[in-house]
Image (tube, rainbow, N blue to C red):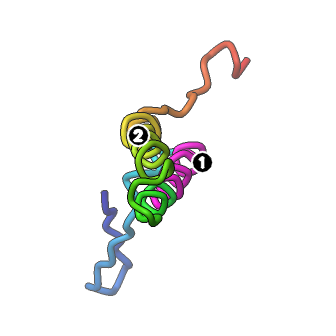
Amino acid sequence: MAKSVRKKGNLKVSKVLTSPFSIYWSRINYIVLALGIILSILGYYFLSVKPWNSATSLYLAPILLVLVYLVFFPLSILIKKKEPTEQESK
């Protein structure tokens, strides 16, 4: 994903690196990913709350972590950018 740039008179070649995610990921992908990371940290915090047999440790934390790993993380990868169609550009 790097483009080579040559300047006349110089033999120095510099590479301009572009992110491979800029093609596929939009702002909404990053928001969903950040929300998933925050919820997973919150789930692990609830899992560590003492006493170990509290409702948050036994019920809330596992449900939250399963939701994050099965919904938010895959959703952040699978959401696609909307590409303009020919009808919208007219």
Q: Would you say 90 lies left or right of 8 here?
A: right
Q: Nearer the viewer, residue 57 or 16?
A: 57
Horizontal side of 19 relative to 31 (left or right) equals left
Quadrant in which the N terminus is drawn:
bottom left
Tell me the SS state at disc 1: helix
Q: Earlier in the sequence, mark 2 or mark 1?
A: 1
How busy is the neighbourhood of tag 2: few (under 14 within 10 Å), some, or many (20 plus)?
Answer: some
Q: Does residue 24 show up?
A: no
Q: Measure the C-alpha gap from mark 2 to mark 1.
A: 12 Å
Which quadrant: the C terminus?
Answer: top right
Q: Position of residue 43 (x, y in %)?
A: 46, 54
Judge by depth and name the residue closer to the eye, 54 or 41. 54
Quick one: 60 or 19, which is closer to the camera? 60
- The structure residue drawn at horizontal position 37% and vertical position 67%, both measured from the top left corner, is 17
Write the start and end of the magenta stretch as one range: 26-41
Residue hosting label 2: 77
Within 10 Å of disc 1 (Cα), the crowding (few <14, some 14-19, many 20+) is few
Residue 70 visible at all: yes
Vertical arrangement, residue 77 with respect to residue 83, above or below: below
The residue at which mark 1 appears reads as 27
Say which residue appears at 39% left-offset and 37% top-offset. Answer: 74
Dominant SS type (magenta) = helix
Residue depicted at 33% across the width and 62% down the height: 3
| Place of residue 24 in the rendered image (x, y in percent of width and height, measured from the top left) | 44, 41
